[in-house]
Amino acid sequence: MKSALLLFLLFLNTCLLADEAPHRMEDLLQKTQLIVHGKISSHTSSSFTINVLDILYNYRTGIKEGDYLLIQNDFSIVCPIDVPLEYAQQKKEAIFFLSYVKNKWYITMGDVAFFNGNKAELAFYVEGYIYRGNLAQWKSDLAGYYRHFKRNSKQKLIPKLDRESWSEVEGLSALAQLQYRSFYKDHFRSLNEHPRLQRLEVFAPKGEEPFQSMATVPGITEPISYEKMQEIGEIIAANARSKYPELEANNIEGFVYYTLSFRADGSIAALKIERPLHGKIHEALRDYFQEHPNWPPTLNAEGEAIRYRQMLHLRFKAT
């Protein structure tokens, strides 16, 4: 079951648009203007049309059930993260997160939750969890989320409950719980028991302790800082451009998401490409970490070294 879920997730998220950046769940849910259950009815080379079957969230758009919306989506990209061409051809149903910009509709942050059977799933990579639910659960959990979170005029996220009280409240929606847990990073509340939330994790070999992540051990100092990650990304991109000139010749641009699994001593146990871009870039990435296998150990709140999984990304841009 877990293997099928991870394979389905990887299939849905095979490619990443060139200017797509890593984002938090609040960036998606607070920036989107319209969330609908829709069915693709037709497509062209640069857009597709959906029939709005149900509205899950609507911020002053005037859209109603039964409307048809034209969504911008460039199908000339080999594998666009928003809606792959084969899904448009199959007229798939999904939960669409939409924004209206300069009189046109776009997919917000490149996120779409396609249905597999009667359930749709979406990975929140920064928070470290997959949300999976049926239409009624999506609708209920989104309503619960927006009752608890909004952004002020300065675009700062404002929670309804403070740090001390949120974990005592019963009946919070799955998405509200995940947002509270992310917002109050030093709160050690487990979400593993929630049936619609599954932790993104690297499975340890039988008999070994599982790798921890920021989702399970908030507030720790990760082996690779954000600044160091950017520095590493620039080095890997430069190496890839030098070794594989065909990358620039073919105008390859975009992000690669990957995870590193660290042993307790800081050495790298595994590298996994989570969202691919191009095989040659992946080779350059693996080459770098084969040459740099040892990093500072990750310490928990008690100062003990732990096995740790860290999500990272690199951006590849043509010069």
Image (cartoon, rainbow, N blue to C red):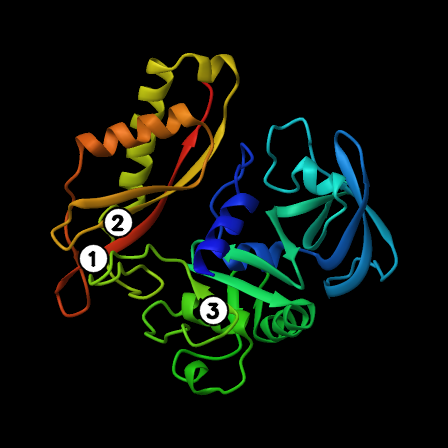
Quadrant in the picture for the C terminus: top left
**Which residue is pictured at 42% across the width and 65% down the height?**
182
Query: Could you tell me the amino acid type at mark 1?
Result: Arg
Q: Which mark is residue 178?
A: 3
Q: Secondary structure at mark 1?
A: loop
> 10 Å neighbourhood of mark 2: few (<14), some, or many (≥20)?
many
- In this rendering, does residue 124 appear at all? no
Residue 91: x %, y % from top left: 77, 46
Q: Is residue 265 left or right of residue 188?
A: left
Q: Secondary structure at mark 2?
A: strand
Residue 219: x %, y % from top left: 28, 64
Q: Is residue 124 left or right of residue 286?
A: right
**Which residue is pictured at 78% across the width and 52% down the height?**
39
Q: Say if 41 sits above or below 32 in the image.
A: above
| Residue at the far right in the pictured view | 66
Q: Say if 232 sits above or below 108 in the image.
A: above
Residue 76: x %, y % from top left: 67, 26
Query: Could you tell me the amino acid type at mark 3?
Result: Leu
> 10 Å neighbourhood of mark 3: few (<14), some, or many (≥20)?
many
Name the one closer to the observer, 149 or 97. Answer: 97
In the image, which is nearer the foreground, mark 3 or mark 1?
1
